[in-house]
């Protein structure tokens, strides 16, 4: 019985951690969103409604096969706030 209670407690802790909401750029100033990305290095941010993405400070947070592409998101005061980069798969087309 004691093992069952411990297992149930661990399950509840794990479930509540998964249910935490992610920070949303639409609820923050542009500067606050940018500072969050730059201080954490890599973070998943909500970008409005049910949309979200992973944003990184620089290319070092991407996989070897990825490149960093500039990322712009909506914020409280502007629809196009530069917050950092998104990691994109594939070769980088330098002429684009």
Image (cartoon, grey):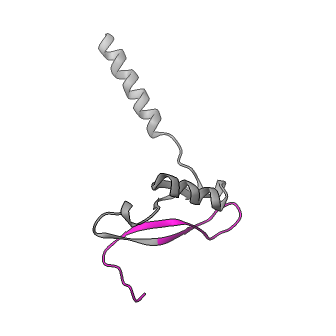
Asked whether 60 or 30 is in front, the reply is: 60
**Residue 45 in the image: above or below residue 93:** above
Magenta run includes residue 71: yes
Using the rendered view, name the quadrant where residue 59 is placed. bottom left
Whether residue 48 appears in this view of the structure is no
- Residue at (65% x, 69% y) in the render: 79
Give the left or right position of residue 11, taking residue 16 as reference: left
Asked whether 87 or 39 is in front, the reply is: 39
Residue span colored magenta? 70-96
**Residue 80 in the image: above or below residue 21:** below
Using the rendered view, name the quadrant where residue 54 is placed. bottom left
Residue 11 placed where, x, y %? 38, 28
**Residue 37 in the image: above or below residue 81:** above
Magenta run includes residue 76: yes
Whether residue 93 appears in this view of the structure is yes
- Residue at (38% x, 60% y) in the render: 61
Give the left or right position of residue 88, taking residue 64 as reference: right
Residue 9 placed where, x, y %? 40, 22
- Residue at (40% x, 89% y) in the render: 95
Quadrant of image for the C terminus: bottom left
Can you name the residue that lies furthest to the right here? Answer: 77
Using the rendered view, name the quadrant where residue 48 is placed. bottom right
Asked whether 31 or 26 is in front, the reply is: 31
- Residue at (63% x, 56% y) in the render: 32
């Amino acid at each position: 019985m004691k093992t069952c209670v411990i297992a149930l407690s661990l399950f509840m802790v794990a479930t509540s951690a998964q249910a935490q909401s992610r920070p949303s750029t639409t609820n923050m100033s542009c500067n606050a969103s940018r500072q969050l990305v730059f201080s954490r290095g890599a973070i998943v941010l909500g970008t409005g409604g049910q949309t979200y993405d992973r944003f990184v400070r620089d290319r070092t947070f991407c996989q070897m096969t990825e490149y960093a592409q500039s990322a712009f998101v909506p914020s409280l005061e502007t629809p196009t706030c530069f917050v950092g980069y998104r990691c994109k798969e594939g070769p980088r087309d330098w002429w684009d």
